[in-house]
């Protein structure tokens, strides 16, 4: 867990430099969009989770706790649940945006699109039961979603709530932090939304 934490923050420090000198890949098809959703969801969910834990617990205590088996399990559970909520939110946002700006047919691919993203997570430890639970939850969400306004009406509310709910911090302490925690993730999502709009090209939903 400690090695994973260090790797994640190295990527976060290098990411702005990569964007500055190399630029980010344009989003032209489903493969590009899938990579964008998966990578950005991982970035936001882990950055906000680890950042919150480190801030609330103190740096030294947090690093030390990562070597504790029970705490590491709790962090891993939180990481997956926040990531999966983030993937759903970002998928709904991007599909809703493309639906309104370019292609009304894209929403027909929402379920299979999510399933492929989750299949790609199996080598990294995604539990089958959690995968199936996520697919069922997503099916219920898209039955109610208004594709016309989803992208501009609190599209990341569920993942922000997931960060607050799943973070392994005592409830009495989390209650004091709720607004700050949710806002910290919302700020990250605002940046991702801006990136997406800049990177999106004329979209070809026949190209995988």
Image: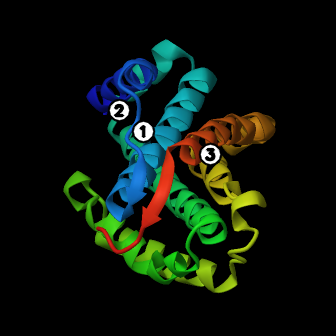
Q: Nearer the viewer, mark 3 or mark 1?
A: 3
Residue at (40, 72) in percent of width and height = 205
How many numbered circles are shown?
A: 3
Q: Residues within 10 Å of mark 2 (few under 14, many from 20)?
A: few
| Badge 2 or badge 3: first in the primary sequence | 2
Helix, strand or loop for disc 2: loop
Look at 66% across and 59% down and name the residue there: 158
Check disc 3: other Cα within 10 Å, few if <14, some if 14-19, many if 20+: some
Q: Name the image quarter holding the C terminus.
A: bottom left
Q: Nearer the viewer, mark 2 or mark 3?
A: 3
Percent from the top left, x then y, of residue 44?
A: 52, 40
Using the image as rendered, state which of residue 155 and residue 65 is in the foreground.
155
Q: Residue furthest front?
A: 202
Q: CA distance from mark 2 to mark 3?
A: 36 Å
Residue 68 - label: 2
CA gap, disc 3 and disc 1: 32 Å
Q: Is residue 21 above or below residue 141?
A: above
Q: Quadrant of residue 101?
A: bottom right
Q: Which of the labelled discs sits on residue 193, or is there none?
A: 3
Circle 1 residue: 71
- Where does the image place residue 145, in percent across and percent down from the top left? 68, 78
Side of 158 relative to 57 (left or right): right
> At x 39% / y 45%, what residue is drawn?
39
**Residue 179, quarter of picture:** top right
Residue at the farthest left position: 123
Task: First in sequence, mark 3 or 1: give its number.
Answer: 1
- Left or right of residue 138: residue 7: left
Left/right placement of residue 173 relative to residue 43 reads right
Asked if the residues shown at circle 2 and circle 1 are in contact, with their CB atoms under 8 angstroms apart, the answer is yes
Frontmost residue, 146 versus 85? 146
Q: Is residue 86 left or right of residue 161?
A: left
């Amino acid at each position: 867990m400690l090695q994973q934490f260090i790797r994640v923050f190295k990527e976060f420090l290098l990411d702005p430099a990569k964007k500055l000198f190399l630029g980010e890949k344009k989003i032209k098809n489903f493969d590009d969009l899938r990579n964008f959703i998966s990578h950005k969801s991982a970035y936001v969910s882990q950055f906000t989770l680890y950042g919150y834990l480190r801030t609330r617990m103190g740096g030294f205590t947090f690093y030390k706790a990562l070597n504790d088996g029970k705490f590491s399990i709790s962090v891993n559970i939180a990481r997956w649940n926040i990531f999966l909520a983030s993937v759903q939110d970002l998928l709904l946002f991007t599909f809703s945006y493309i639906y309104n700006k370019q292609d009304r047919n894209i929403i027909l691919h929402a379920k299979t699109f999510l399933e492929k993203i989750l299949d790609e997570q199996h080598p990294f430890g995604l539990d089958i039961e959690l995968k199936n639970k996520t697919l069922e939850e997503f099916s219920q969400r898209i039955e109610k979603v208004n594709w016309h306004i989803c992208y501009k009406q609190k599209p990341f509310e569920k993942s922000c709530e997931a960060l607050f709910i799943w973070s392994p911090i005592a409830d009495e302490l989390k209650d004091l932090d709720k607004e700050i925690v949710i806002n910290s993730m919302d700020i990250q999502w605002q940046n991702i939304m801006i990136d997406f709009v800049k990177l999106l090209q004329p979209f070809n939903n026949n190209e995988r």
